[in-house]
Amino acid sequence: SIQRLLPPPGDVNRKRAENTHELPSDIESHAADRQESQKQYYDRNCKPSKELPEGQTVLARDFSGNKTRWERGRIKHGSGPMSYCIAMEDGRAIRRHVDHIKP
């Protein structure tokens, strides 16, 4: 029968899959433009990092024991882009991320 030779009705005007997603001719500049666009959206909600001077008194989260609590200490030095070493009042030295430090 002739119907076995014809494509299904939904496929008559459908484009081939390999033709629907063509890459731009200048892929590197396109990728750079998309990265810049993503950076702008990210930077919109990004908080500036806290910079804490050495010797400043701070409250740091203490996770020892059963309860977490805030204890007083002094900034010794930075130990990374977002963390600091802190000398606690009880003599311990701990390292904390800026999210766990209150100036």
Image (cartoon, helix red, strand yellow):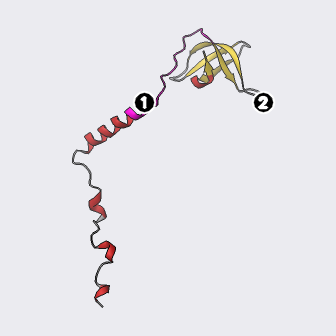
Describe residue 69's horizontal placement relative to residue 55 as left or right: right
Left or right: 63 as drawn, with respect to 79: right
The residue under label 1 is 44
Mark 1, other Cα within 10 Å: few <14 / some 14–19 / many ≥20: few
Farthest residue toward the right? 66
- Which structural element holds mark 1? helix
Quadrant where the C terminus sits is top right
Q: What residue is rendered at 71% in x and 12% in y? A: 89
The amino acid on which the numbered mark 1 sits, given as a three-letter code, is: Arg
Residue 66 vs 57, above or below: the answer is below
Residue furthest to the left in view is 25
Q: Residue at x 42, y 30 (%)?
A: 44
Q: Which residues are magenta?
A: 40-57
Label for residue 77?
none
In this view, the mark in front (1 or 2): 1
Query: Quadrant location of residue 64?
Result: top right
Position of 58 with respect to 6 (left or right) is: right
Where does label 2 land, which residue?
A: 66
Helix or strand or loop: what does disc 2 sit on? loop
Quadrant of the image containing the N terminus: bottom left
Q: Is residue 52 magenta?
A: yes
Residue closest to the far top: 55
**Residue at left offset 46%, top offset 28%:** 46
* Type of amino acid under label 2: Asn
Residue 19 in the image, given as x and y percentages of width and height: 26, 61
Task: Give percent across and percent down for residue 37.
Answer: 34, 36
